[in-house]
Image (cartoon, rainbow, N blue to C red):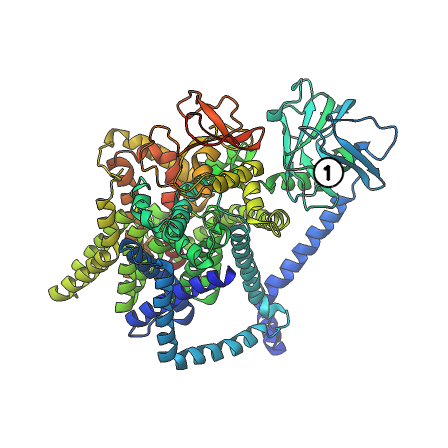
Amino acid sequence: MLFGLCLGLFLIFVLGWGIVWLLDRARVLRGMEKLAISFLLGQIGTTLLFFGFLVFRLPQPAFGEALLLGTLSLLIIFFERKNILAGILRIVPAIKQGLVWRPFNGATFKRWLLVILLLLIGLKLAYALVETGSKPEYAWDASGNWTACGKGLYYVTLEQPSRLPQFWASQGNNYPKHVSLMHGWLFSLMQQANDQWSKIFFWLNLLCLVMIFYQTVSATGTRWRALFFTYFLLSGPYFIYMSTIGYADFTLMVYFSVGIVYFYQWVRTKQETYFYLFSLFLAATTWIKLEGKPYAVLGMILVGLFVWLDKSYALKAKCIKTAQYIGAGLIIGLPWQCFALAQPWGSRERLALHLPQALELLRLIYGKMFIEGTWGIFWIIAIAGVLLSWRKIKRREILALAVAVLLFFAVLLSIFLFTEDALGWFEVSFNRILLSVYPVVVLLLSLL
Amino acid sequence: MAKQKKIKIKAQSGHPVSPDKKIFYWFSVLLFAAGLIGLCLAFSPEEEKVFDFSRPDFRWEVSAGTKILNSAAGITFSKGGPQLYVVIPGNYVDADNFDVCDIELATPIAYEDIQLLFVSPYNPEFKLENGVNFDSGPARRFNHDWLNLRHHPAWQGAVTGILLLPSDKIQSFSLKKIRFVRANLWHRCLAVWRDFTRFYDPKLGTCFSMASPLFINSSFNGFFVPFLWILTASVLLVAIVDFAFKLDPRVRTFAWVVFLVLAGSVWGLLDLRNNQFYLKGMGRDINLYWGKSLSEKRGIVVGDPEFVRFMEFCDQNIPLDANVINGVPVNLPGTPANYLSATQVGYILRPRLAAGLKAAAPDEKTYYIFYKNPEHKLADGKSAINLKMFKVFNAEASILVPAKTGKDLK
């Protein structure tokens, strides 16, 4: 079983590595970052492939996909053998260097603080791993929806493949299925519906986010700053807890925030690779939750603001950038949207106006963000940080992040004010929606 | 002139004290002073009332059916009936005098929830809502559990009865002593810290909001909102003044430092608590889940192991082309409302797709599953009729089928 799990995760990673290899022709991505992006993009690639195998009713979908990805991995290993070998050889001296004992004296005081930060980061990651990997799925929506669908897919493809259309129809809602398909894929390779181990990809997502976040902050600041803000990111208890329970909100947060992080990197460096990553990650959110669609629109507005209002771009370049963003959205997002429309599910996404409740909504938001305690004093720190360093926000790349955060809040308000039943779900959904922007705000604070 | 000389000597020495070293020295001095104060506080005398379970003349009572094993280490109580608890009746404890309770006990499950209930003039009977919850500490060893009773609204006057009630998961526990203490500052801090870092299993609602204990029903909460307003208003004021008059960078830096010290202290305190919570959580996960089968783990985590076994029994015995009707009640003790019925039935059973999307009229492929539902009530509130037994799991859980079909009665 564990071999199947490792194989499943390895194949995801290999597929992602292939995608990154194709995208990053300029080789701007660094080692740790590259690994993290490979795993995240590999998941979306695996989901799309697995979904394709299921929709076109190809026999043995998981086995077929594993065969395809296995062949791909052999090809990548063959063509990249020199780079892979060199990478492995670089790891050994790096570990040796890290293990050299440096005596404790006043001059190394900062180093000790770094060690303490590393230990705290390690503790939080260790807790998330133990909590995720020790128990099967139990949380409400995870067992009632996300994992349940993955489990169903596994059993139906195994025992009653002819009833797959009935299975899809029985789902009853148009929730995107990335998380379910990931579970289904891992169950299929493990040859059992072991929801304790399949959850491990949530923890790996957390790890990937932490790696990308660290690399992003360290690209413009010191190692000290990068470690401190990585610790700060992980010190949100709600953030850690959500990484352990199998909810799609956490995965959505990872993809959305990584997308925005690469938008910031693109504005900062103008490297095309970052723009591709931004487009792909934002498009991927449409596969994770219904909120993904407004997030993809948010990305489109960002493109509008930072490409179309930028006079340094020629009209042709502006059109190309917009086409790239829309193209990524269509290639990744459209298959699920078309499939969902063809099903007898209906949709909860209906427009309705709740403007009279706007003040009441603001009161509720104030309570959730500042008083209730889920976020501790995080939002106070965020607001104060922005107010005390507002001059720095004028810098274009920081402005990009600030605008993304503001747009996020606009999206959040519009979800509650202009859709039919979201306001009714405010109590149970607000903190989960807000989670999506948490890493982006921490990144913004790290740059002030 | 003298000043110039001093600078010269310092320059000649060639070993100026680096800022790093200065910080280190001050940190060491502070640490030493804190340690000294801590030691003084720890050894200051305190008044106490002790209930020692190893003494033969001490009178206590237990729940019906409880098995008792006396040993040198303490007394072990094992569940023999529906509940397990220990009562100390008729002993007088002056609640106005004693503000901390120290319970020395050992449980087989790490960091499990235990309640201390008491009878006082403000709480005339043992009420769960007036109890004091605490976690039992690491498993299989005697721990001192310090309880902060100082601010408990019902802990006043003469306390005449004490009851110790472990959670349903605990099948046995050992007890040495219960001490009520007029605590010195050290033990009081310990009790406050234990209360602040108390471990609780994340509940189903935790995914919606996750308030830190500082913010829930605590005296801190009364200070927090004004603190928040003053902090925000101050920052806003600095920002407006800066915008209007362009503050000196040193003033801005000073504002930053003040803000960081205040915010960092609160954030650090909360994070310290979270870190201890995580350590406890890992200890509990390792103790409670590791080495068990997936089914056993699921039983623990959903709060009803028997239900999970019954669902697996149903999954094995009901054919895949059957139409399953869910007769698991919405409200079951020990689990949140509608949790088992709405999420776990569909989750544990493999998909039964033959019946199609709409609930068809009962036919020979219809199977009813009933769990702790003696009246066989269905989701619409009406009792199912004309059923016969198909498979029995136990007295409270069974699979039934319509009586008119040709299935054999088993």
Residue topped by disc 1? B173
Give the quadrant of the C terminus of chain A.
bottom left
The image quarter containing residue A81 is bottom left
Kind of residue sitting beneath label 1: Phe
For mark 1, name the chain: B
Nearer-the-camera pick, B375 or A135: B375
Estimate the x, y position of residue A110 in percent, counting from the top left.
55, 65
Q: How many numbered tags mark residues here?
A: 1
Estimate the x, y position of residue A223 in percent, counting from the top left.
47, 66
Q: Residue furthest right?
A: B56
* Left or right of A125 in this view: A292: left
- Residue B237 in sight here: no
Nearer-the-camera pick, B147 or B170: B170
Which residue: 35% across, 48% down? B239
Which residue: 20% across, 57% down? A326
What kind of element bears circle 1? Answer: strand
Q: Residue furthest bottom?
A: A82
Estimate the x, y position of residue B10 in percent, counting from the top left.
61, 73
Residue A311 vs B77, above or below: the answer is: below
Estimate the x, y position of residue B255 in percent, counting from the top left.
44, 50
* Left or right of A124 in this view: A247: left
